[in-house]
Image (cartoon, rainbow, N blue to C red):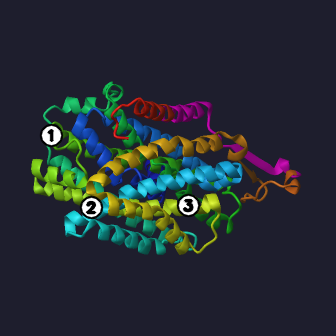
Amino acid sequence: MSSMTTISQVLGKFCKFIGPGIMVSVAYMDPGNYSTSVSGGAQFRYELLFSIFISNIFAVILQCLCVKLGSVTGLDLAENCRRYLPRKWNLIIYVFAEIAIIATDLAEVVGTAIALQILFHIPVLWGVILTILDVLIILIFYRPEQHSMKQVRFFEMFVSFFVAATVVCFILELFKISIPDKLELFRGFLPSKVIFEEDQAMYISLGILGATVMPHSLYLGSSLVKSRLHEFDLKKFGKLGSRPSLSAIKSTLNYSYAELIISLFFIATFVNSAILIVAGATLFGQPDAEDADLTSIYELLSRYISPAAGLIFALAMLFSGQSAGIICTMAGQIVSEGFLQWSFQPWVTRLLTRLLAIIPCFLVTLFMGERGIANILNLSQVVLSLILPIVSLPLIYFTSNSKIMTVTETFEHNEPIDEPTESTALNEQNKHKVNYANSRWLTVASYLVWATIGSLNCYLVISFLMGADVHF
């Protein structure tokens, strides 16, 4: 077989895996990112691009662990927490995961509502209500537990349309700005001491981290990979075991890794960097830009670049807010079903999880006004950063545990098997075991990421308690 034929086959197979990584990347480019990245660009120009870059490195490491956990165990992160953690710790982590979804939904719903106000002059409160209905209507028709892979891919393409529209909007924004000193821009991706010298820079950096490595995306990433594994086992064996077969894991795992990494770097990193670059090039040094909210960001872009630039920004908010709202509702369902094993109809589960997250958003919008919303948006992203070490620690523990990450498969029948029993143990010589637990270097890297995030969070909290002005 020629090398060109092999490359063609690999690319053809890879195309079938496009979708989950794009849906995960949505969680890294919602309107909450706009608020924190614009604040970073307006106050520190390009110096916080490093925060975006390192946040995406952290995201890649943690999301690869999610892909591995979901592929090897056949369970998402929430389901693994319910199975392997004591009930008390399972419930505590569930509460923090739900708080993270509420904080995430706040940014997405409010951002979309403000975009509707700018584009169609719909009051923000009505925009919030329309956003809820829109997401619910869409998700009623998304039932991967009943649909074929063709229908799942159609839904992934539907979300990918919003992602592509967001990317196009920021490409257009970049063409509308001027950056005389390109070297200054590229230096922004290198470590900067301003992060530790300025309390506000640390606050915004943690907001960027929380808006990038969102806790709910870990549950989402570990769940989305399951549909391809199920498709493989149904086609090859005609049934599903309690865990994916070794053949399914070998066939899908590397492609899932590749699709995820490419999606995060070429979509999430690009969009987050573009937001900060546009803000740094146009709003840095402007007296009214430092405390700009989403509405005033639109007005500033319209004033300092052009009305078209403001319009493109509002469209990007609408597209990303809609796609992120859909993804957040999916994550809410995954969290509730995984931790609590809810047995309601799927549409009831989606309605309950959506209301649980959306009621605080509605109250904030109703009582705090647009100025209060701007402060709450930045705070919500920092809250996500504070919660991230709590929900990511079980992920690292599970993927480093050989007992959880070892797959057993029989040679004789070459089909997926259920959990080992006393009778199956008698045929140990006919079984093949593969340990997918993290290597030593990956375990060290994962815990370093966890420790870094935790240390930065402690630094922020201590700074706040000592009286630093971090708008906490």
| In this rendering, position of residue 45 left or right of residue 436 | left
> What residue is shown at x 62% (from left), y 38% (from top)?
438
Q: Which mark is residue 174?
A: none
Mark 3 or mark 1: which comes first in sequence? 1
Tag 1's secondary structure?
Answer: loop
Q: Is mark 2 on a helix, strand or loop?
A: helix
| Percent coordinates x, y for residue 300 in the rendering | 15, 50
Question: What is the total number of numbered labels drawn onto the structure image?
Answer: 3
Front residue of this view, candidates 38 and 72: 38
Q: Residues within 10 Å of mark 3 (few under 14, many from 20)?
A: many
* Mark 3, secondary structure of its residue: helix
Q: How crowded is mark 2: few (under 14 residues within 10 Å), some or many (20 or more)?
A: many
Residue 79 image point, x, y percent? 64, 56
Q: Can residue 241 be seen here?
A: yes
The quarter of the displayed image where residue 19 is located:
bottom left
Location of residue 420 with respect to 323 vertically, above or below: above
Amino acid type, label 1: Pro
Q: Earlier in the sequence, mark 1 or mark 2?
A: 2
Q: Which residue is nearer to you in this view: 75 or 306?
A: 306
Provide the residue designation for mark 3: 334
Residue indicated by mark 2: 114
Q: Mark 1 points at which residue?
A: 287
Amino acid at the residue labelled 2: Ile
Q: Which of marks 2 and 3 is in front?
A: 2
In the depicted view, which residue is nearer to us: 209 or 409?
Answer: 209
Closest to the observer, 256 or 207 = 207
Return the x and y of residue 8 as percentages of the image width and height: 44, 53
Residue located 60% across and 63% down the image: 337
Give the residue drawn at x 27%, y 61%: 114
Residues shaded magenta? 426-453
**Residue 271 seen by the camera:** no
